[in-house]
Amino acid sequence: MQTYIRIHLMRMIFALAGAAALIMPSAIAWSAPPDLHTVVSEKDGIVHVQYASAGSVVGVSTDSAPAGVEILLPKGNPAPVRFDKTTDHGSVIELGPTKIGSLTVRLRITQRTPSLIERTLEVTAEKAQRCTFIFPLQTTLKGQFASFSGPATNRTLYDTVRGSAHTETFPVAMCRTSNRVFGIAADSPALWENRCQVMVDPEAQQMAILTGDGRAAYPLVIKPPEDARDTYQYQMDGWQSLAAGETRRFTTWVYLSAADNQYDAQVAFHLAVANAKGWNSSGLQAILRNTSYYLLRRNLMCDENNQPRSGKYIFVSGMSYGWKQWVSAGIFSALGLNDPEKTIEAYRAVFWNRIDYEGNAQLYLIWAVLAKRAGEEVNDMLDRKAYAFLREHEKDGFYVPPSLPGSPSPKGCKTYMDQLHYEDGDAPASDQGFECGAMMAAKELRLGATDEDIERTIAAYQSIFNAKKGFMPTSMKQQEILGQDTLYGATLTYAVFGRKVLTDEQVLTHYRTSEKAKSRFGLRVISAADGSLLPGNDGSYCSGGSWFFCDTGNYLLAGVHGLNAAEVDEKLIERIKLELVRHPAFNEDINTVTGEPHGNTPYADYSAYLWLRNELRQRAGQSGSDPVEEAIDRRLGVVKENGALILSHDIHAN
């Protein structure tokens, strides 16, 4: 039997006596950075696929899955997908096609980097067929098995659907030795009809990705009071259902990386996906864009009348929220992901009951402008309805949000920070910042807004500023409460329209006051003028928590209004490091008393930072590498080598 081992993008081939000779129980002499290569062999006319590094097999082929793929059909048991032919295209190996009943299956294996292998299974159905696929990965390594969140000591199945016994946002399984991690990762659940599971089995030395667990149909429902007004429902099951003539593709990645601990292993997953997808300018970009990518979902939900909702995709803010999308989550996550198809489909998924509360009407119009600039068709009916809603609730240029029917509190759900309370007739500064951008959007969309409307809205926003205290308060009527969600709308408005809506003095004064008052765990979304917690607040979520896009929005806007670029960078670096203390993931908020993450981790909306930072740097004429991204890479231990991001043991920084 002759075995072919691909070395350095398949350029070096040598023969060995047999694949079994590669399996060595002794310690492996690792290279730095590690290499990982596909091993293709043939046994009894069947192709076997293994993975080798430093002359030894680390991923083992088995008779139950010789190519690393199993199929499960209804009323059956998992069976191997066997291929009897291969085609070599240099850095790409193609297996098949092979027939399984009415299905035609192909497997493409691509060496993406010296330590990253991509496998894409292509399945075509001649007639309608339910099935699911399993991608097992057996390893010879002796180490700690884990999902993204942490170690697993027993066989555990993790799901990406809320309500499962064990859930994970990032579908990855890993085996970590003292200084390396070997892992397998799945593509975004959105591309697999939201069916994506991860299995970790330490006793069997095995990991696996599943495109569905074969379970029978069960209901997924979100209804009031969890959602204020709407019912979302869907009959979910554990199968991929292909129509006659349909082709599906399922991509997984096998990778090897340096890793001293679980945190490093988590970073290694981010880098592997980012290298495969090409959004790898930095570790920071990898983490934030991956977050949006893995919180993207197929929009499978139906309304209360069991009718499918529009839009192929939606963005979920975090796992606990289920398969629904706010306008804010949609625009912020879409900006971060920067994928035109996903952006427009998520935009199409918005419906009226998601627009008429908080800052959603303003954000919807701004999103419509960005979609139109990209050449997409916008929803003129919803645009006009959103604009009419804003004008209906305008008073002398102030946006005065109404109470939301069905809300747990009639004073809440008036800004993105839904639990903050505002009396009827009050104008929150958070909404007012977005209102300025919304009026500019309405003019560009030709909805009837005039220059005079824009000026009146800007004047109202500026008038909220508390010049005596030196900060932007949370609202027009709550002048003594320091608000840190108050400038983000101005930041987005400048990024989209290139116009300042506050004075330089106001923004820089607010910045200086806030820096004096901030906690050691970030700015508090609301606080007393001196930065202390308000009565009854505990330092988390809306009760004085630190929200990443509020803090960084302030710093980015301060740079627009004249703050030295080096100081802006310093503040951004400091704040981003707070997010990444426990995991390489961004938190819904940070408790400003304990420093503990609170809410969903990871949280998708914050990926908008990538777009904002890039837009503002371009508008400022800043070119070259981003000092913030460079500093965070040093913190994570990330370097770029031959166009790929890798972890290095030598450069971990505090």
Image: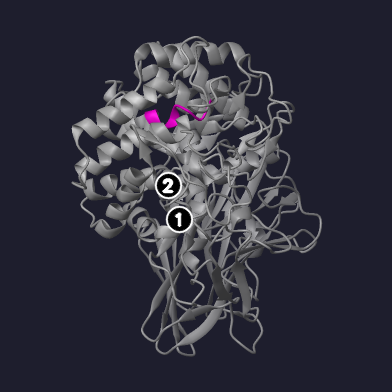
Q: Earlier in the sequence, mark 2 or mark 1?
A: 1
* Amino acid type indicated by mark 1: Arg
221 shown above or below 116:
below
Left or right placement of residue 28 versus residue 309 in this view: right
170 shown above or below 268:
below
Q: Nearer the viewer, residue 70 or 224?
A: 224
Q: Report the disc number at residue 643.
A: none
Quarter of the picture containing the N terminus is bottom right
Q: Which residue sits at x=42%, y=73%?
A: 248
Q: Is residue 7 visible?
A: no
Quarter of the picture containing the C terminus is top right
Q: Report the disc number at residue 354.
A: 1
Proximity of marks 2 and 1: CB atoms separated by less than 8 Å: yes
* Amino acid type indicated by mark 2: Asn
Image coordinates of residue 265 in percent, x first then y, are 64, 42
Q: Residues within 10 Å of mark 2 (few under 14, many from 20)?
A: many
Residue occupied by mark 2: 360
**Magenta-drawn segment:** 484-490
Q: Which residue sits at x=66%, y=52%?
A: 174
Q: CA distance from mark 2 to mark 1?
A: 7 Å
387 shown above or below 517:
below
Magenta-span inclusion, residue 323? no
Q: Nearer the viewer, residue 196 or 538?
A: 538
